[in-house]
């Protein structure tokens, strides 16, 4: 960690909450893969490795006020802004009370009306346009204190919709923050085959906004960049592109075999930079936590996820007569 929590005015309670949340996210992630292997979840997608990026941004956003436009990688973000492990398990098992879509959408299409967490489509990069449209709406309605924050991978920056959205935001200097979770792969395709420059953030200049690169596994660095970008947007100074360099610790989804395109050594070297280990180490070194307290948090997360799994498994499926609800045409 390059900064201390005191330098960032983060409280010890915030650190404890984030660490538990990150451990919980990883525990939910583990459970998703188990459910997939058991045939109880047909599609799962991981956020393991991205927790510092997603929790760091959550610290900086005014949750329930700002609009958050995520992508399928943002399961930890859903927890960070207030969704529960039960919400996510209902979603993955496509149960009636799944808050994302009532069991209609494949896993990863998170949404919540109350949290202003805007569900999108799986079409990579398409939701950027939604975030920019929201920001244009804030401008039109003179809701000057609102910000839209949108998340996407580095692969999305190769999409036409991404270009059109960010270009429009730059022209109109809209209150939107673009967050690139650069995990170096778009499924099996390495970033060097999708992004023609070493840093996605470099692209910002061409769109009339600042671009910032941060270590996405360092929650403090992410928070600092997130806070500055959100403050800029809120005070009318326009958009920012924040690139968080991170790594996807698991295969893209349960339909992917990552051993075909990356080495075990590469994955192992990133495991050593695991964002949860990084924050734990910081807290131990600053005498904010002991290893045995971390073990307790892990057990707590395990118990919470076990309970949520039991509840989700017992929860009702969507009724058959709701088959045609919410369909238009
Ligand atoms: C327009 C479009 N093209 C291809 C796909 C298939 N696809 C789904 S996820 C993905 C990888 C995107 O990579 P990136 O934007 O880096 O995000 P990451 O999954 O690495 O977080 C691809 C190619 C899609 N869903 N939509
Ligand atoms: Mg990627």
Image (cartoon, rainbow, N blue to C red):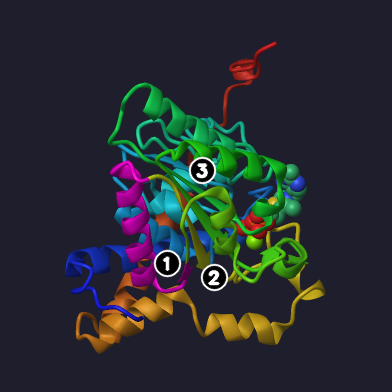
Name the foreground residue: 286 vs 177. Answer: 177
Residue 217 colored magenta?
yes
Real-space CA distance between mark 3 and mark 2, rounded to the nearest whole angstrom: 25 Å
Q: Is residue 318 left or right of residue 9?
A: right
The crowding category of the residue bearing disc 2, from other C-alpha atoms within 10 Å (few below 14, some 14 to 19, many at least 20), is: many
Q: Are marks 1 and 2 in contact (CB under 8 Å)?
A: yes
Indicate whether 71 appears above or below 197.
above
Q: Which residue is mark 1?
A: 52
Indicate whether 45 appears above or below 284.
above
Name the foreground residue: 118 vs 215. Answer: 215
Residue 286 colored magenta?
no
**Residue 28: image x %, image y %?**
48, 59
Q: Earlier in the sequence, mark 1 or mark 2?
A: 1
Q: Which residue is mark 2?
A: 246
Real-space CA distance between mark 3 and mark 1, rounded to the nearest whole angstrom: 27 Å
For the point 52% across and 30% down, the residue is: 96
* Residue 198 shows in this picture: yes
Q: Is residue 251 left or right of residue 172?
A: right
Displayed-image quarter of ligand 2 = bottom right
Indicate whether 296 appears above or below 253.
below
Q: Which residue is mark 3?
A: 170
Corner quadrant of residue 290: bottom left
Q: Look at the image and give the residue range highlighted in magenta.
A: 213-237
């Amino acid at each position: 960690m390059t900064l201390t929590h005191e330098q960032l005015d983060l409280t010890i309670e915030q650190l404890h909450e984030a660490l538990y949340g990150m451990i919980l996210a990883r525990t939910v992630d583990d459970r998703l893969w188990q459910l997939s292997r058991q045939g109880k979840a047909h599609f799962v997608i991981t956020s393991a490795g991205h927790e510092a990026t997603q929790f760091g941004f959550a610290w900086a956003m005014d949750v329930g006020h700002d609009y958050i436009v995520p992508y399928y990688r943002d399961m930890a973000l859903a927890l960070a802004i207030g969704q529960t492990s039960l919400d996510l398990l209902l979603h993955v098992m496509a149960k009636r009370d799944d808050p994302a879509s009532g069991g209609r959408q494949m896993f990863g299409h998170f949404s919540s009306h109350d949290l202003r967490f805007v569900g999108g489509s799986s079409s990579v990069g398409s939701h950027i346009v939604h975030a920019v449209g929201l920001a244009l709406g804030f401008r039109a309605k003179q809701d000057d204190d609102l910000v839209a924050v949108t998340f996407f991978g580095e692969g999305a920056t190769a999409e036409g919709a991404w270009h059109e959205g960010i270009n429009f935001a730059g022209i109109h200097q809209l209150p939107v923050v673009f967050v690139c979770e650069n995990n170096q792969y778009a499924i099996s395709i390495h970033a060097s085959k999708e992004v023609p420059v070493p840093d996605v953030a470099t692209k910002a200049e061409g769109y009339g906004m600042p671009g910032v690169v941060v270590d996405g596994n360092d929650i403090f660095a992410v928070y600092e960049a997130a806070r500055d970008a959100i403050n800029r947007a809120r005070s009318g100074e326009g958009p920012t592109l924040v690139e968080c360099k991170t790594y996807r610790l698991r295969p893209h989804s349960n339909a992917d075999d990552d051993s075909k395109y990356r080495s075990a050594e590469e994955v192992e070297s990133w495991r050593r930079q695991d964002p949860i280990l990084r924050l734990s180490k910081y807290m131990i070194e600053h005498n904010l936590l002991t290893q045995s307290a971390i073990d307790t948090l892990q057990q707590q997360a395990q118990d919470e996820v076990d309970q949520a799994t039991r509840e989700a498994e017992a929860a009702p499926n969507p009724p058959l007569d709701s088959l045609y609800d919410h369909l238009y045409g």
